Amino acid sequence: MLAATKRSSRNWKYFINLIPAGLAVFGNLNGSWWSLSNFLFVFVILAFAEILLPEDKNNEEGADDVLPDLLMLLVVVAQFIAIGSLAYGVYQGYLSGFWIFGAALSTGAASGSLGIVIAHELIHKKQAFWNFLGRLLLFSVFNPYFYVHHLRVHHKWVGTGHDPVTANKGESFYAFFFRTVSGQFKQSFELEKVRLQKQGQSPFGFNNYVVAVLAGAIFISLTIAYFFGYQVALAVLMQALLANLLLEYTNYIEHYGLSRDDKERVNEMHSWQSDKVVSRYFLIDLSRHADHHFHAAKPFNKLVSYQNSPVLPGGYTSMFLPALIPPLWFRLVDKRIPA
């Protein structure tokens, strides 16, 4: 009984992932300084908390209960409530001027730490329902390439020159950002083009996932602008932009400087990991990324920590600022890259 309770406690801890959505909604509906609530929570409070709190290297698996599925369903709902509250706050005048920008940052921080993280988990699932919800979350931030590229390129070629998501040693986040976005977009479109041509279909139709998402994003944005005003549309676009920036920041720190031969099997040495408490539970153990690539189908509440995997000097939230300052990032991380 005690062991079962302990395993369930791991599942319960992941529910802190819902906090950003709640703060974003509160800020969007109250305006003024409150609009920055979640932005400050994610990038200031959590960063300091991560520095102060210890690691949790416990490898006991989470219980096989309904909690992980319940959390993911709640996140899907919370994601759209947060974005809806942003649009509503701007439209009703609760947010104006600079506070629209602040609210978009807070909502984007929620989308990046909540929606995309759960989307990443869901697109790995084979069941059509869960997979659809993952793609739906990605569409909420208008991302046209992650679903295709992550599953069909990144997991196969991580750590090699074929994968634009693997950051090179000495490459700044800024250089990486433009290289990876263009690379992922190009490779995803080409993969969809080849797939559809084999089926005798037009590569430029809506059956092409990349084309469909881009067309949907344009249609939704223009519809919002027409019915609710350009400020509402810009706010929704800004939150999507920050969410995707956070996605690529995460990609940057997950594999920076780690390489392998094309014929070498992916193992626990090809991804950075962190057992910092905040990153572990706030990001549903995305920080145990080494195990995720070693065993891609493993649910987040089963991921383990490896003694020999490369370890980041901090967690995902506390490493955000160093990643934006290349000399500091290189000084902290380069010496930890395995020979």
Image (cartoon, rainbow, N blue to C red):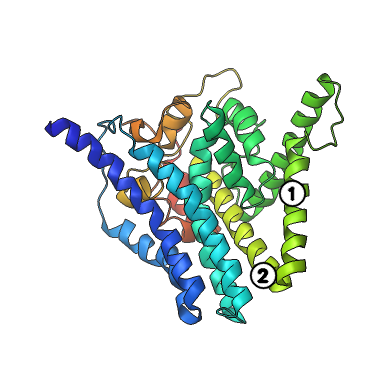
Could you say which quadrant of the image residue 62 lies in? top left
Any part of residue 61 in sight: yes
Residue drawn at x 43%, y 51% as measured from the top left: 316
Quick one: SS at disc 2?
A: helix
Q: Please tell me the numbered disc located at residue 232.
A: 2
As drawn, is 168 to the left or to the right of 190?
Answer: left
Could you say which quadrant of the image residue 58 lies in? top left
Q: Nearer the viewer, residue 37 or 330?
A: 37
Distance (Cα) linking label 1 and label 2: 17 Å
Q: Amino acid at mark 2?
A: Val
Q: Amino acid at mark 1?
A: Gly
List the residue tagged with mark 1.
216
Q: Earlier in the sequence, mark 1 or mark 2?
A: 1
Residue 164 on image: x %, y %: 66, 38
Residue 262 on image: x %, y %: 61, 22
Quick one: SS at disc 1?
A: helix
Residue 251 on image: x %, y %: 55, 44
Q: Is residue 26 above or below residue 146?
A: below
